[in-house]
């Protein structure tokens, strides 16, 4: 015989049973296996820069010095510091005055007309303080982007005790040419010694304000050799302009204005630039980070690159690129 | 007392049975096919390195074959430069790339769908791609204004079964509807495409746009039709949860990151294995080819499980 309380109890039981089972069924469907893919726990990325391949070119010590000035520290130089500069064995920011950035004070006023004075003072500083602990000296601007690993690789075939001067070779003004300042240039230890000696003996002077050309003249006077840093396919590694000035396909045409100075005949389109490019110039801060992303982060998974400098057997005849004679 | 206890037990038993019955009944509903692959998760993550290393060599080989992609690239004469650029850049990395145009162009060849309506054109293209799928089981739909890295798409779907319904990309929400944004590319597994093609015939489930009171963009329309077949939009992410399908360009995302993560701009920006970017100019796409497929620091080896060969007859990758 049913009475009201009995009904209440019955309904309570009904609800209890319903919700208990609902809960049980619910938790099962949450666990629901997909069958075709199992997700693992959160774990650290593997796609970041891996440990370098067994090339222990850690024997090559590169000092990067950045030509900068007080007004650009916040707007430009800090982004150099945040991106590629940390790959140098040592980095020095050369400015007119010393600051906590930190910058080295060269005691030279700022201004385009003083660029060569700054360069001379900078190399004097380097010669006084870093000849013992560094092998190669790269000069770059605060709007130059450098892939230091590729510089390291390019330098590995040159002897730093020999007089070497490397970069993007320009032909005007100097008989054998000179290296573009904006694209960054590199001096071996011996080249730095000769540069300093040149100024001490008066063989080299501050005869021009055009820093890169003037330095090239001193290199010529002191019989420092200009190295060819193009890769095995004849593609450039140092670039005085951003990538889009070179790699975009164009129909055959006369040299554009920004390639007029090139010593080696420039190639336009995809064949312009080495996979192991070393530098680009006129790079504003957002592009610094974009290049950092493209170089050190973004990649195509599993892609087998076409260019493998290590695979090639170094035959010194057929693969070697012919040096173009300057016009 | 005993009778009350008995009442309770009877109640519980009936409640439980009722609950069971309801859930079983729900799962047998014809609208939502219940199968082992049915999933209502909203994101799909790329496999981590650990997961991949656990696979056997034989399995890896199977996956390489299975993961081939058919690209469906939507073009129009008015975006001729993008059309030419897609042809010369990222589309070369698809196992098969077919261009579908609204009207023919004298300059470039494509499948001329002769259709001005965006949704109708998309449907025709998808149908054509399905009918000509061959043995390809993954489909990537994009406009020529999108830039894609197909190898990274393959990595994302590497361990996924294309016989299951997958509809991936940059998943967005419009009210209750979750859809994949067209601009960042749409990925469909064979099963998803099959279900879509079958439901496209049905006017009631998947109406032509003209019948709706409002004009829904074709990517939302696609989501509606797929939803009817039990296929739901999912966000494609890397193993850290970072989105792989970007509606903006690299430059734009970096600028955003400079503002939002000034001390960690690059890491806070975009995935290392990003699949798509949008709003890039044709010239920027050419630069991307160099940046993605060539520019790299010497001496770094990623030990990826798979190897994708460079396409034949191409010089910019």
Image: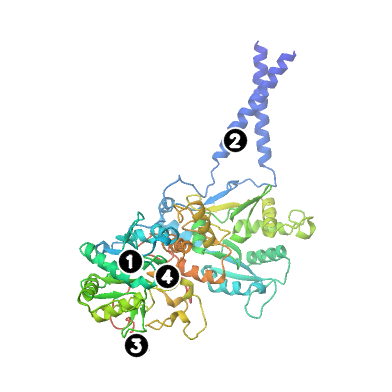
Residue B138 versus residue B115 in the image, above or below: above
| Residue highlighted by disc 2 | A26
Q: Are marks 1 and 4 on the same chain?
A: yes
Q: How many marks?
A: 4
**Chain of the residue under the numbered disc 2 shown in the image:** A
Q: Which mark is residue A325?
A: 3
Q: Which mark is residue A70?
A: none
Of residue B201 and residue B13, the one placed in the foreground of this image is B201
Quadrant housing the N terminus of chain A: top right
Q: Are marks 4 and 3 in contact (CB under 8 Å)?
A: no
For marks 1 and 2, give the one nearer the viewer.
Answer: 1
Residue A69 placement, left or right of B63: left
| Residue highlighted by disc 4 | A281
| Residue highlighted by disc 1 | A108
- Helix, strand or loop at disc 4? strand
Q: Quadrant of residue B106?
A: bottom right
Of residue A32 and residue A285, the one placed in the foreground of this image is A285
| x, y percent for residue A168 | 36, 76
Residue B11 versus residue A304 in the image, above or below: above
**Chain of the residue under the numbered disc 1 shown in the image:** A
| x, y percent for residue B176 | 68, 47
- Report, in whole angstroms, how far the alpha carbon at label 1 lies from the one at label 4: 24 Å
- Helix, strand or loop at disc 3? loop
- Helix, strand or loop at disc 1? loop
Q: Are marks 3 and 2 on the same chain?
A: yes
Q: Please report whichever mark, 1 or 2, sits nearer to the chain's N-terminal start.
A: 2
Residue at 71% of width from left, 64% of height from top?
B118
- Helix, strand or loop at disc 2? helix
């Amino acid at each position: 015989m049913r009475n009201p309380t009995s009904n209440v109890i019955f309904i309570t039981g009904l609800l209890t049973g319903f919700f208990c089972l609902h809960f049980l069924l619910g938790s099962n469907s949450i666990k629901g296996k997909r069958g075709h893919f199992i997700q693992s726990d959160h774990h650290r990325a593997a796609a970041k820069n891996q440990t370098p391949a067994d090339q222990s070119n850690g024997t090559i010590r590169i000092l990067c010095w950045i030509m900068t000035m007080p007004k650009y520290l916040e707007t430009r130089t800090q982004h150099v510091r945040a991106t590629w500069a940390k790959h140098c064995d040592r980095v020095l920011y050369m400015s007119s005055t010393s600051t906590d950035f930190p910058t080295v004070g060269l005691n030279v006023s700022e201004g385009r007309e003083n660029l060569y004075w700054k360069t001379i003072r900078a190399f004097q500083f380097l010669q006084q303080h870093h000849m013992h602990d560094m092998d190669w000296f790269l000069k770059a601007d605060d709007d130059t982007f450098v892939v230091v690993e590729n510089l390291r690789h390019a330098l590995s075939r040159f002897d730093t005790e020999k007089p070497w001067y490397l970069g993007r070779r320009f032909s005007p003004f100097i008989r054998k040419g000179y290296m573009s300042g904006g694209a960054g240039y590199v001096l071996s230890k011996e080249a730095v010694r000769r540069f300093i000696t040149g100024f001490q003996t008066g063989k080299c002077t501050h005869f021009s304000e055009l820093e890169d050309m003037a330095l090239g003249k001193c290199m010529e006077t002191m019989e420092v050799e200009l190295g060819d840093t193009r890769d095995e396919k004849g593609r450039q590694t140092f670039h005085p302009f951003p990538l889009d000035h070179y790699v975009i396909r164009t129909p055959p045409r006369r040299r554009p204005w920004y390639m007029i100075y090139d010593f080696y005949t420039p190639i336009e389109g995809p064949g312009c630039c080495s996979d192991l490019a070393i530098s680009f110039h006129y790079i504003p801060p957002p592009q610094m980070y974009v290049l950092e992303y493209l170089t050190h982060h973004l990649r195509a998974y599993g892609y087998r690159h076409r260019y493998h400098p290590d695979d090639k057997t170094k035959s010194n005849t057929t693969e070697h690129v012919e040096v173009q004679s300057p016009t | 007392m005993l009778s009350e206890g008995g009442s309770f037990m009877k109640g519980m038993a009936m409640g439980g049975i009722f609950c069971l019955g309801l859930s079983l009944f729900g799962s047998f509903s014809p609208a939502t096919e219940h199968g082992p692959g049915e999933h209502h998760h909203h994101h799909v993550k790329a496999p981590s390195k650990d997961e991949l290393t656990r696979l056997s060599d034989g399995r890896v080989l199977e996956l390489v074959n299975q993961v081939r992609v058919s690209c469906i690239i939507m073009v129009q004469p008015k975006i001729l430069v993008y059309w030419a650029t897609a042809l010369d850049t990222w589309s070369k990395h698809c196992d098969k790339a077919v261009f579908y145009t609204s009207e023919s162009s004298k300059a470039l060849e494509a499948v001329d769908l002769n259709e001005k309506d965006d949704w109708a054109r998309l449907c025709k293209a998808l149908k054509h791609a399905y009918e000509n799928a061959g043995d390809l089981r993954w489909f990537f739909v994009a406009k020529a204004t999108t830039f894609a890295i197909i190898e990274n798409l393959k990595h994302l779907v590497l361990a996924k079964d294309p016989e299951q319904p997958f509809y991936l990309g940059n998943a967005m929400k419009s009210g209750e509807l979750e859809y994949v944004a067209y601009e960042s590319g749409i990925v469909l597994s064979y099963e998803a495409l099959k279900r879509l093609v079958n439901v496209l015939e049905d006017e009631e489930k998947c109406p032509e746009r003209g019948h709706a009171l409002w004009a829904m963009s074709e990517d939302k329309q696609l989501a509606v039709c797929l939803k009817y077949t039990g296929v739901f939009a999912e966000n494609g992410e890397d193993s850290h949860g970072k989105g792989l399908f970007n509606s903006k360009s690299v430059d734009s995302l970096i600028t955003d990151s400079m503002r939002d993560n000034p001390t960690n701009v690059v890491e806070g920006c975009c995935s290392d294995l990003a699949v798509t970017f949008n709003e890039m100019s044709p010239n920027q796409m050419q630069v991307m080819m160099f940046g993605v497929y060539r520019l790299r620091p010497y001496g770094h080896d990623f030990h990826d499980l798979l190897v994708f060969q460079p396409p034949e007859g191409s010089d910019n990758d």
